[in-house]
Every structure is written in C-alpha cells, then in structure tokens.
Amino acid sequence: MKNVSSAALRRRRHQLVLALPPLEQIIRGSLSETYKRCGRSSCHCNSGPGHGPKRYLSTVARTGERPRLGYVPNATYPQVSEYLTNYRELQQMLNEICAINAELLRRRESLD
C-alpha cells in the first residue's frame, strides 16, 4: 500500500464501502454437518453414512459465552450459508478499509 497514491487509496475505500454486503443479511457463526444412525438393524444407515445431512449453526451471542447450536432445516441451508459468507466478506472488507485509513493517517493526510 505504500507505493499507492492517496487518491487511489480513497477510491479503493469508496469501492469497498459500495460493495459491502447488506448488513441485515449477515450471521456470525459456523455450520456443522452430521449424519445420524437410527439404530434399526434393517435400515440403510447401518451400512452407509447415516441419515442426513443434519446441519447445525453454532453462534456466540456475546464474547465469553458458550456457543449455542441451532438446527438449520435443509430448506434454509442455502440462505444461512450465504449469510455466513456475507459476514466473512464484510470482515475482510472492514479490515481492508481499516488498513487504508491507517495508511492515510500514517501519511498525515485527511481521512475525508
């Protein structure tokens, strides 16, 4: 970033702000996928991976709390997965915006 002009840094920061995912469409957490066996001796799950996939979302409401697991129905899995991706992208974009602002401050330039 040191070889990039201040104007280019401001343009990149503006592009990032415009590309931010919708804030109402984010979830911080992680998905886990399990397969379960029912216990019936004649069921196909005894010789295969099991029934499933069953997906669970692990979230932490506040720092220091234990994670909470919530079942994710198959119908809502694509949306939950997208919201998780949005969160990761938002995090990366915010990190880049912070780095740009820090570089502008290091150069003793206005943040506007």
Image: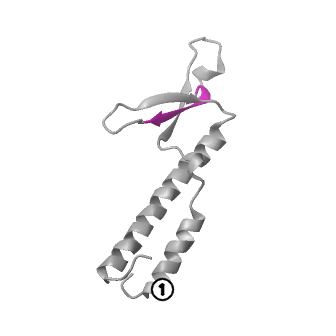
Q: Residue at x 32, y 77 (%)?
A: 105
Residue 55 colored magenta? yes
Question: Callout 1: helix, strand or loop?
Answer: helix
- Is 50 or 64 nearer to us in this picture? 64
Residue 4 is situated, as x and y percent measured from the top left of the image, at 43, 86
- Mark 1: amino acid: Ala
- Horizontal side of residue 111 vs 12, given as left or right: left
- Horizontal side of residue 6 vs 27, given as left or right: left
- Is 111 or 32 nearer to us in this picture? 111
Q: Which residues are magenta?
A: 50-59
Quadrant including the C terminus: bottom left
- Is 105 or 52 nearer to us in this picture? 105
Residue 18 is situated, as x and y percent measured from the top left of the image, at 59, 67
Residue 45 colored magenta? no
Q: Residue at x 52, y 43 (%)?
A: 27
- The residue lying furthest to the right in this view is 75
Name the chief secondary structure element in magenta: strand
Q: Which residue lies under the disc numbered 1?
A: 7
- Is 14 or 91 nearer to us in this picture? 14
Residue 45 is situated, as x and y percent measured from the top left of the image, at 61, 22
- Rendering quarter of residue 110: bottom left
